[in-house]
Image: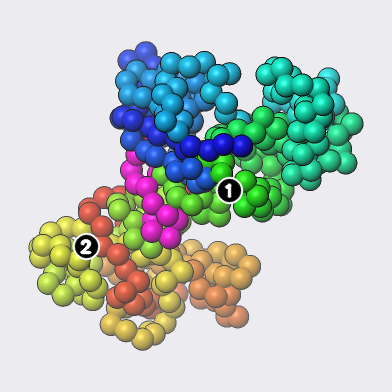
């Protein structure tokens, strides 16, 4: 398998005059897993289809390595692709499904047999070669689809919501398998389209966050989670409390409550958005200078944690707090105090309103 990476050079796509991908500039390095993360209609699948050759950009160029493939048909791009519906041929056995792309490329019979065996072993499906798709579980069918994509030894692998049709337990197992495959195929560049933040955070070397046809941010999972560029990225990569504040010299004002935090050079008097991750909000007085008091509006038991939704006393904002499972949790309507450390808050440009939770 030979890599080379993917490069979008100011790529735009439009349907009937409506722009669905707007001037995308993005590079996937050789051997890198890049997740395209965003809500429905954000442009992420369109970007993947532009790489595959299923849509033609209205402007811009698509490169695989040094090759400009913008005008090439899909079968000449040497790309492996896996979609959420598996797209297996029901009348063909597993080994015949995996061999399909090789036979289309007129690979010699003996080499085809070896590559099919290799791909099935790599995906843990070697024992199922003689079965038909109807005899397999959903997770097994998806493994066969991945084996088929790998059998052609692509330099680029495109994954379009590959786990969305699986239940939670199967999805967790397939995430582990995809992570293992990435380790075993260090030269293959992977573009992974998903709306699931857990998949992106688990698998990706970097995440490109899409919204309204445009790239909003790109970075490592840690960068986007701990220091997001904007309110949309903060709300989509993990859960976030996003609270409108007024910047002060040594902190910020949330309503009438003074908060101590790093204002990162923001001008005093400016409006901004305070980003605070729920797991960094503690229950009770706690150490440090920052406290918010309010009323419990909702409480959810999540196994190892309780999530509290607290309507704080300033400007009617609701704050999420994820705390370790409580033996005696507060009830709806109880008054509580929340606390957080100055270093755990990030100041962003003014954006999405307080308490908005996006997935």
The segment highlighted magenta reads: 209-224
Q: Is residue 320 left or right of residue 107?
A: left
Circle count: 2
Q: Nearer the viewer, residue 22 or 303?
A: 22
On screen, 10 above or below 204? above
**Residue 155: % across, % down:** 56, 35
Q: Is residue 322 left or right of residue 240?
A: right
Q: Residue at x 71, y 17 (%)?
A: 106
Q: Residue at x 21, y 58 (%)?
A: 272
Q: Secondary structure at mark 1?
A: loop
- Residue 141 lies in what quarter of the image? top right
Q: Residue lying furthest top in this view? A: 16
In the picture, the disc for residue 245 is 2
- Residue 130 lies in what quarter of the image? top right
Q: Nearer the viewer, residue 221 or 292?
A: 221
In the picture, the disc for residue 186 is 1
Q: Is residue 303 left or right of residue 287?
A: right
- Residue 284 lies in what quarter of the image? bottom left
Q: Pointer 2 and pointer 1: residues touching (CB < 8 Å)?
A: no
**Residue 131: % across, % down:** 88, 31
On screen, 92 above or below 24? above
């Amino acid at each position: 398998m030979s890599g080379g990476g993917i490069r979008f050079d100011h790529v735009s796509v439009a349907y009937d005059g409506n722009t669905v991908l707007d001037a995308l500039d993005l590079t996937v390095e050789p051997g890198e897993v890049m997740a395209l993360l965003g809500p429905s209609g954000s442009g992420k699948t369109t970007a993947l289809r532009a790489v595959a050759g299923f849509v033609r950009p209205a402007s811009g160029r698509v490169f695989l390595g040094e090759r400009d493939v913008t005008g090439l048909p899909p079968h000449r791009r040497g790309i492996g692709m896996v979609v959420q519906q598996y797209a297996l041929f029901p009348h063909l056995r597993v080994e015949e499904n995996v061999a399909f792309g090789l036979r289309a490329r007129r690979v010699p019979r003996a080499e085809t047999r070896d590559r099919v065996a290799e791909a099935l072993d790599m995906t843990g499906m070697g024992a199922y070669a003689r079965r038909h798709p109807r005899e397999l579980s959903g997770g097994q069918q998806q493994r066969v689809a991945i084996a088929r994509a790998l059998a052609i030894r692509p330099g680029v692998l495109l994954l379009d919501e590959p786990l969305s049709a699986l239940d939670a337990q199967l999805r967790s197992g397939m995430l582990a398998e995809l992570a293992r495959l990435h380790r075993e195929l260090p030269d293959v560049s992977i573009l992974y389209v998903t709306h699931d933040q857990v998949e992106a955070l688990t698998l990706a070397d970097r995440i490109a966050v899409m919204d309204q046809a445009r790239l909003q941010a790109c970075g490592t999972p840690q960068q986007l989670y701990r220091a997001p560029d904007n309110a949309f990225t903060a709300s989509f990569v993990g859960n976030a409390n996003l609270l409108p504040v007024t910047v002060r010299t040594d902190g910020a004002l949330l309503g009438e409550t003074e908060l101590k935090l790093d204002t990162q050079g923001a001008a005093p008097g400016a409006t901004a958005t305070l980003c605070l991750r729920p797991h960094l909000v503690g229950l009770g007085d706690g150490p440090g200078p920052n406290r918010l008091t309010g009323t419990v509006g909702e409480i959810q038991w999540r196994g190892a944690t309780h999530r509290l939704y607290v309507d704080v006393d300033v400007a009617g904002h609701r704050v999420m707090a994820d705390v370790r499972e409580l033996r005696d949790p507060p009830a709806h309507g109880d008054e509580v105090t929340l606390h957080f450390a100055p270093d755990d808050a990030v100041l962003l440009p003014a954006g999405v309103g307080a308490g908005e939770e996006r997935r």
